[in-house]
Image (spheres, helix red, strand yellow):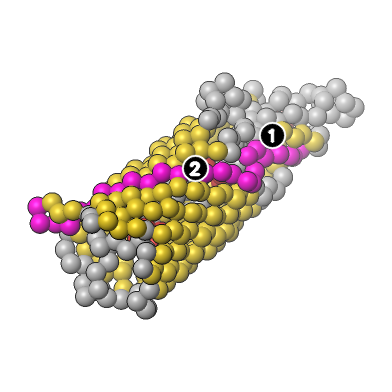
Amino acid sequence: MALTIPRHHLRNLIAASLLVSAGGTSSLRAQFAPPTGTPDVPPPITIVTVTPGDPGDPGNPPVTEPTPTATTTTPTEPKDMKDVKNMKSSVTYNAGCGDYFELFITGSGTYGDMGNSGDPGHFYFDRAQGNLGLEYHFAQDWTVGTILSYAHVDSSYGNFNASTTTDSYLPTLFVAYDHEGWWANLSTTDGYDTFTEQRGTPSGQANGAGDGWQYGGKLIGGYLFTNGPWSYGPVVDVHGYEVNASGFNEDGAGTNDLHFNHESPYSVQTQFGGLVRYDTEVGGMQVEPYLSASWQHEYGDASQLITGNTSTGAAFSGNSVYIDRDSALIDLGVKAKVSCSVDVFLGYQGDIGGNFLTSTAQGGVSVSF
């Protein structure tokens, strides 16, 4: 099982950072079965354009306008190997080679370029995630399991001297069904996040830190037609996540320090697409290349309102960078059965929108027993 993270998670300040880390959860991407869906990637972060209170107001001494920063939060969405595994992959599961349990370890690395280069909130991020999972085949058509994931995100804002980091810890539970071509996977994720932010000001570097939590769920399914070594069919994915980031105070920049209020961005996405894979043998080893493509639409926050106060108490507010609601998702890779009970895979996932691009490389190994 693997995790992926979707772009909807970086929509605001701290929440933005947390969202990127979280995969929100964006969902569990199946890695030991042809993956379908979007990468734990999430994605994207948002930047905020802050407008401090009018320095000319009585009682409000001049305050240097703060540099917009966004704590990148990305709900980390563990990629559920079940997403693909439940597509009756001969490479993935063979009764008799460890009939009941499967232990898997997967990892992924993501790079994202969010927003147009001229946008005030344009930013880049790098995300690394590791997943450890265990599943149990308790009936011919049913599987249950759990995944423990850790994700780290570093973000930088090209137009400002600002950066954020986020660490997310995410447990996931899932149940999968697979019968005569029909397959489905239902998962739920809850997690804890910590974050830091730094930005340059005329009076020195302002630093902030806080924590938060996230929760969400994902339902993915479809039908696979089989024609000789070929398998293909439609895939539908619905998932949603919410990230809650605590308010926090900056320090280190004197009168340019800010207080940011609590933020709770959310994301609801649908994906419609298809999957194709081919079963073959190379050097006596069973190999299965796969390709999936889908259209993704975001119904939740595409931009986030950020609010807070300056060191003098003056209120400010601003909006994070707007991330396009529609994108194309491409997932390709290859799985191989090294032995009766050991599978490995390598893959790539791309999320391409009008003003953003994320690329994820991933791999893993599973052992049945």
Residue occupying the far right of the picture:
58
Residue 175 located left or right of residue 66: left
Q: Type of residue at label 1? A: Asn
**What residue appears at the point 81 percent right and 24 percent down from the top-left corner?**
55
Element type at mark 2 = strand
Q: Where are the magenta residues, as a range?
A: 283-309
Q: Residues within 10 Å of mark 2 (few under 14, many from 20)?
A: some
Q: Which mark is residue 192?
A: none
Quick one: 210 or 83, which is closer to the camera?
A: 83
Element type at mark 1 = strand
- Report the number of discs: 2
Asked if labels 2 and 1 touch by Cβ distance under 8 angstroms, the answer is: no
Would you say the magenta stretch is mainly helix, strand or loop? Answer: strand
Residue 346 located left or right of residue 162: left
Q: For residue 60, what is the image quadrant?
A: top right
**What residue appears at the point 29 percent right and 61 percent down from the top-left corner?**
89
Indicate the position of residue 120 as horizontal and vertical percent values.
Answer: 61, 25
**Residue bearing the label numbered 2:** 295
Task: Examine the rendered structure and indicate whether residue 321 appears above or below residue 195.
Answer: above
Q: Type of residue at label 2? A: Trp
